[in-house]
Image (cartoon, rainbow, N blue to C red):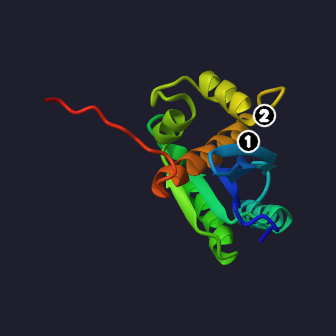
């Protein structure tokens, strides 16, 4: 735990076998700030089990270095390529296992939830989400590669969700009379 206990560090993950993006943000009340991002990459020439082990070891290293208190992972979506579903699901499982092993709670958000948290629109284009992620975090450039930007988006979504769950944001709804 950091000296300022009102700051929460969130690790966002965009799971994949070839590339798993990660991003770390800090949340203090309604402010979300950038900490770090990166991408864990494996190659198709590697043995499948070795690829999963590499992902596991790398994310453990990220957790050890950045010490997050919360994890946020993008849920899997396979409308276009069902063939990649199993390997990506296995990578997601390895990532979740490393986070759980560290005693960190992990929350799952589907792509539309993340898009809505970042842009206000669940069907936003990827480029819109990336640009808003850049703006929210005050970065000069859109984080690269795309998987890292997506991971930062998951972390921001988690931070915004925390505000609502803790009652720090008052949501007023219009009701029909």
Disc 1 crowd rating (10 Å Cα; few below 14, some 14-19, many 20+) is: many
Labelled pair 1, 2 in contact (Cβ < 8 Å): yes
Q: Quadrant of residue 33?
A: top right
Depth check, front residue: 104 or 47? 104
| SS class, disc 2 | loop
| SS class, disc 1 | helix
Residue at label 1?
A: 148
Q: Residue at x 65, y 27 (%)?
A: 132
Is residue 66 placed above or below 119 in the rendered structure?
below
Q: Residue at x 69, y 61 (%)?
A: 6
Horizontal and vertical percent for residue 96?
Answer: 61, 65
Residue at label 2?
A: 143
Horizontal and vertical percent for residue 151?
Answer: 67, 45
Name the image quarter holding the C terminus.
top left
Comes first in the chain, label 1 or label 2: 2
> With 144 as the anchor, is 150 left or right in this view?
left
């Amino acid at each position: 735990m950091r000296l300022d206990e009102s700051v929460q560090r969130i690790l966002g993950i965009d799971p994949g076998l070839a590339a798993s993006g990660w991003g770390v943000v800090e949340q203090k009340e309604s402010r979300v700030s950038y900490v770090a991002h990166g991408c864990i990459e494996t190659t198709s020439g590697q043995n499948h089990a070795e690829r999963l082990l590499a992902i596991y070891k790398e994310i453990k290293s990220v957790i050890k270095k950045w010490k997050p208190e919360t994890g946020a992972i993008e849920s899997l979506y396979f409308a276009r390529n069902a063939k990649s579903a199993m390997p990506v699901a296995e990578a997601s499982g390895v990532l979740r296992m490393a986070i759980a092993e560290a005693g960190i709670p992990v929350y799952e958000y589907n792509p539309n939830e993340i898009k809505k948290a970042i842009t206000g629109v669940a069907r936003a284009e990827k480029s819109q989400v990336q640009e808003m992620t850049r703006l929210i975090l005050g970065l000069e450039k859109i984080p690269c590669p795309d998987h890292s930007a997506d991971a930062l988006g998951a972390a921001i979504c988690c931070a915004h969700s925390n505000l609502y769950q803790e009652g720090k944001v008052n949501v007023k709804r219009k009701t029909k009379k």
